[in-house]
Amino acid sequence: MHAFSCVEDYRLAARRRLTKLAFDYLEGGAEDGEALRRNREAFGQWGFAPRVMQDISQTTSQTTLWGRAAAAPMVVGPTGLNGLFWPRADELLARAAADAGLPFVLSTASTSLLEDVRAAVPDGELWLQLYVQQDRRIAESMMRRAREAGFRTLMLTVDTPVHGKRDHDTRNGFKLPLRFTPRLVADCMRHPHWSWQMLVGGAPQLRNIAKSVGERADLARHAAMLSRQMDLSLSWDDLAWVRRHWPGEVLVKGILTLDDARQAQAHGADGIVVSNHGGRQLGSTLAPVEALPMIVDAVNAGGPAMAVFLDGGVRRGGDVAKAVALGAKGVLLGRAPLYGVAARGGQGVAGVLELLLGELRTTLQLLGCASVDDLTPQRLAKLPSL
Ligand SMILES: Cc1cc2nc3c(=O)[nH]c(=O)nc-3n(C[C@H](O)[C@H](O)[C@H](O)COP(=O)(O)O)c2cc1C
C-alpha cells in the first residue's frame, strides 16, 4: 500500500493504474502544453506574508456560497468522461464531495445520468455544468431534468465552442466510441486492473447527453456525435434564454479577459469562473491566477455583485488560499479529484479532498488567519525572480 501525502502522490498512482490513453486524456493540455504549465507555475509568483501572534485557536476554512454553507471555498469541478477513470466515477466524486461538505459540478459530458448521481447523494449540493449543442432542445432537456433532480446552480461553459487541439489524443487514437485498435489492446495488457474494470462495466458512454437526445438506437454513437456539435452562434444575449430555463444561480465558466467579465456582469450572471479549461483549449494563455486580480478589480468597480471563482492548477491547499487572497470567492478542482478517483476510486477522491482541506487549514493557521475572510491581498507578496 502506498502512502499518499499530497495530490502528486495520487497523480503518480493514477498514472500507474490507467492506460496511457486514459491518463493522457486526463492530464494533457492543448498543443505544446504552455497554458497547462503556466497555470501551475503562476501560483509560484506569489509567496505568503504571514502574521504571527494572532488567535488562531478557532480557525475554520468554512464559507458560504449564496447563503449555503461549504466546508471550504472549494468546489469539485465539472469533468467529462469520468467513467474512463473508474466505474461510476461521477457518483463517487459526488459522494466524496458531499461527505467533505463541498459542492459537486456534474458535466454535461458525464458518463452517469444526473438522476443516478442525485440518487447516490440525496443530501449533496449538486450543480450542473452545461454545454449548449446546436440543437438547443438537448440543453433545455438537461436543464429541466437537473431542476427536477434538485440541482441548485448552473455553470455555463463558454470556452469550448470547438475542441482544443490535443495532440496526445490524436496520437493515441482517442475517439468516442472507443475503438479497440492493436495499440489500445497493447496498452490494456499493460494495465490489467483498468482493463478488467472496463471489460466488466463496459466502455464509458455519454449517457447524460444520450438521455436528453432521447434516441434509443445506437446511443453511444449518436451522443458522441451530437456532443461535438456545439452551438457556435451562442452569444451574451443567450444568457436570457438560460435564465428562462434555470431559476437558480447561473455562472459563466471560461472567462479570461476584463471585457468578458464585464459582459457577464452586465448580462446578470451570478458568477464567473476565471478559467482556461485547465489549459486544454488554447495552447497558450495567461494563467487564470494571473488574470484574476484585474478581473476582481473590474467586477468590484461597479455593477451588480458577482462571485468570481477560479480554476486551473490548484494542487495544494495553499493554492486555494492564494486564489482567495487575490479575491476569488472559491476555486474549482479539476484534475486533483480525478487523480484520486483514478488511483483508488471513491476512497481516493476522499483522500484528495481531505489532504487539500488539511493543507488549507494549516496554511490559514500559519498565516495567522482565523477564517477565509482574513485572506486579503496583504497576506501575499509578489516574489521577485531569483
Ligand atoms: C479530464 C477533464 C475533463 C474536463 N471536462 C470538462 C467538461 O466536461 N466541462 C467543463 O466545463 N470543463 C471540463 N474540464 C475543465 C475543468 O472543469 C477545469 O476547468 C480544469 O480542469 C481546471 O484545471 P485543473 O485541472 O488544473 O484543476 C475538464 C478537465 C479535465 C482535466
Image (cartoon, helix red, strand yellow):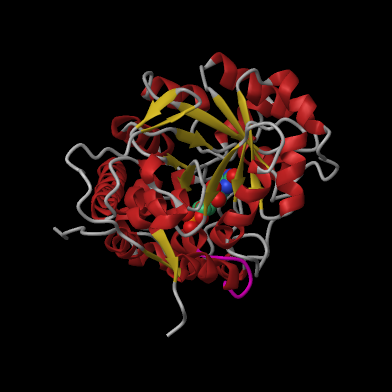
Q: How many marks?
A: 0
Toward the top, the furthest residue is 148
The one of 308 and 347 positioned closer to us in this rendering: 308
Q: Is residue 331 visible?
A: yes
Say above or below: 172 vs 214. below
In the rendered image, residue 369 lying in the magenta stretch gets the answer: no
The one of 343 and 383 positioned closer to us in this rendering: 383
The overriding secondary structure of the stretch rendered in magenta is loop
Q: Residue at x 38, y 48 (%)?
A: 337
- Tell me where the magenta segment starts and ends, as one range: 28-33
The one of 233 and 333 positioned closer to us in this rendering: 333
- Quarter the C terminus occupies: bottom left
Toward the left, the furthest residue is 1
In the rendered image, residue 31 lying in the magenta stretch gets the answer: yes
Q: Is residue 334 visible?
A: no
Q: Residue at x 57, y 72 (%)?
A: 33
Q: Position of residue 260 (x, y in %)?
A: 74, 48
Toward the bottom, the furthest residue is 386
- Quarter the N terminus occupies: bottom left
Q: Position of residue 124 (x, y in %)?
A: 39, 24
Give the side of residue 368 with respect to residue 211, left or right.
Answer: left
**Based on the displayed image, in which of its 4 quarters is residue 372 positioned?**
top left
Give the side of residue 33 with respect to residue 355, left or right.
Answer: right
Say above or below: 272 vs 323. above
Q: Position of residue 158 (x, y in %)?
A: 70, 45
**Based on the displayed image, in which of its 4 quarters is residue 129 positioned?**
top right
Give the side of residue 269 with respect to residue 340, left or right.
Answer: right
Q: Residue at x 52, y 42 (%)?
A: 78
Say above or below: 172 vs 345. below
